[in-house]
Amino acid sequence: MSTPWKVPPETYVDCGWQNARLPLSCTTSGVLTQRAMPLLLVLAAPRATCWARMFRFLRVQIIHPCRAKCTWCATHKKNPLFQKLVDNGMAKQIHDFYIETIRRLKPEEVFISGGEPMLSPDIADFLNAIAPHVKLINLFTSYQWSAGDRKRMPLDRMPLDKIVFNHTPIYFEPDEWEKLTQGFPFDVYLENLQHFASLPARKRFKFIINHERFPEEFQRFQEIVRPDKTFMLSLKVINDQGNGLMVDRMTETRALINERVQQLDTLIEGEGWGTIRRTAGSLDQMAVLLEDGDVERCAFRNDPIELRFALDPKVRRGKAVLRYRYCPYFPPDFGHRFHIGRDDPALLEQNYFKGDFRKHCAKCRFLRYYAGTPKHLDKEAAGSTSQREEAR
Ligand SMILES: C[S@@+](CC[C@H](N)C(=O)[O-])C[C@H]1O[C@@H](n2cnc3c(N)ncnc32)[C@H](O)[C@@H]1O
Ligand code: SF4
């Protein structure tokens, strides 16, 4: 029997199709089977507008080189490709596709990664184009730019009331920082941070809980930056973004993660930052997987929470190709491909329900933190190999 998964009723609010769903009697208390869903998709296709608000979160990658060279991040290795796409106009084509998709799907929150979005000359226009369609824009930035670059940033043209500037501090200590950023001056970084601290926009700092010295890092940050009410905090884990780069570190810190994940609500308070709000993130949603390694409990598998795009490093016949995924922890080598200008945008929603992506959950990057023997997904996903072996 195929694995059932839940479709949350709120996914389809404002949607005529929701009513059409129930009489088809392939649901039991809102549970659809993987076999029934493609049939529903065919029936629902003419009513494409009813997919509005399907994904609460949508993540895009701005095509612009990142000048930072953080040793743990694989993105800067794509710089030559980013630059090529900027020069040949394909970056604009990709950004226009994002705008169109955001207008169509109307996610509550958009997450903007890069490259380095703050260095893109088109960033203010991009933000203004999407702002009317979303509640919040989360923009990731490295704070690794020169004072001159900072002065040229069109901050006065940005919809600051909708933006949260997100940043992950790396130990927040000059020696460690210069080593991990391959030489970016700590004082220039601090000036950039302090300038943004004074802006009337929200700032979120995502601390990495794998760091053994997280309490010290956190303490220093408070002393130096003096965060006010415009600051928010969250916690994250290191991720195997570099296609193997971080695996050892992830495995080494497993015990720490297992311990700290139990304390997500109190960890920051315990470090003396009780007045600043901690915002929940994917780590909160994923913590349940560490209890028994059962991916069927994963929120991202069960509900269409998120759609994320990244550039496919292979440009085919001069056409821009994106990869898209439905969760933050998919194996680095997997992603559905979307060919801009060729593929039907409805695929972005349809493939969520089609379900094939769930076969790759056996290689969920988050499962590296699970210490026991994960439960098997189903025969197709795990084959004769245990998921624990696959997850490594
Ligand atoms: C890839 S960067 C791109 C946007 C921007 N240049 C920046 O540095 O924020 C987006 C986020 O990914 C984070 N990141 C990069 N490599 C990571 C890894 N291996 N594990 C967890 N987060 C990582 C960065 O710290 C940053 O917060
Ligand atoms: S890969 Fe991991 S996070 Fe993604 S849907 Fe599967 S179990 Fe969930």
Image (cartoon, grey):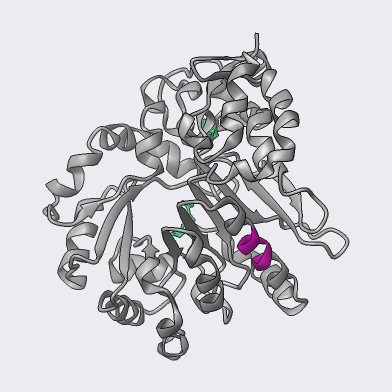
| Up-down relation of residue 126 to residue 363 (above or below) | below
User: Which sits in the foreground, 120 or 110?
Assistant: 110
Which image quarter: residue 79? Answer: bottom right
Does 180 sit above or below residue 11?
below
Measured from the top left, where is residue 105 in percent x and y? Answer: 58, 50
Q: Is residue 99 magenta?
A: yes
Name the residue rendered at 38%, 63% in the picture: 167
User: In the rendered image of this protein, does residue 19 appear above or below residue 271?
Assistant: above
Secondary structure mostly taken by the magenta-highlighted segment of the chain: helix
Res. 385 visible in picture: no
Which quadrant, please, contains the C terminus? top right
Q: In this view, does 308 lie to the left or right of 383?
A: left
In the picture, measured across the screen, residue 382 lies left or right of residue 135, that is right
> Does the magenta-highlighted stretch encompass residue 161?
no
In depth, the one of 326 and 288 nearer the eye is 326
- Count of numbered labels shown in the rendering: 0
* Front residue of 171 and 92: 92
Residue 34 image position (x, y, % from top left): 65, 20
Residue under the image location 36 percent in, 32 percent down: 287
| Magenta extent | 95-100
Identity of the residue drawn at 55% across and 77% down: 125
Whether residue 367 appears in this view of the structure is yes
Quadrant in the rendering for residue 169: bottom left
Give x and y (percent) for residue 107. Answer: 51, 51
Is 240 situated left or right of 371 in this image?
right
Q: Single out the residue that lies furthest toward the right.
A: 317
Residue 89 against residue 208 in the figure, above or below: below
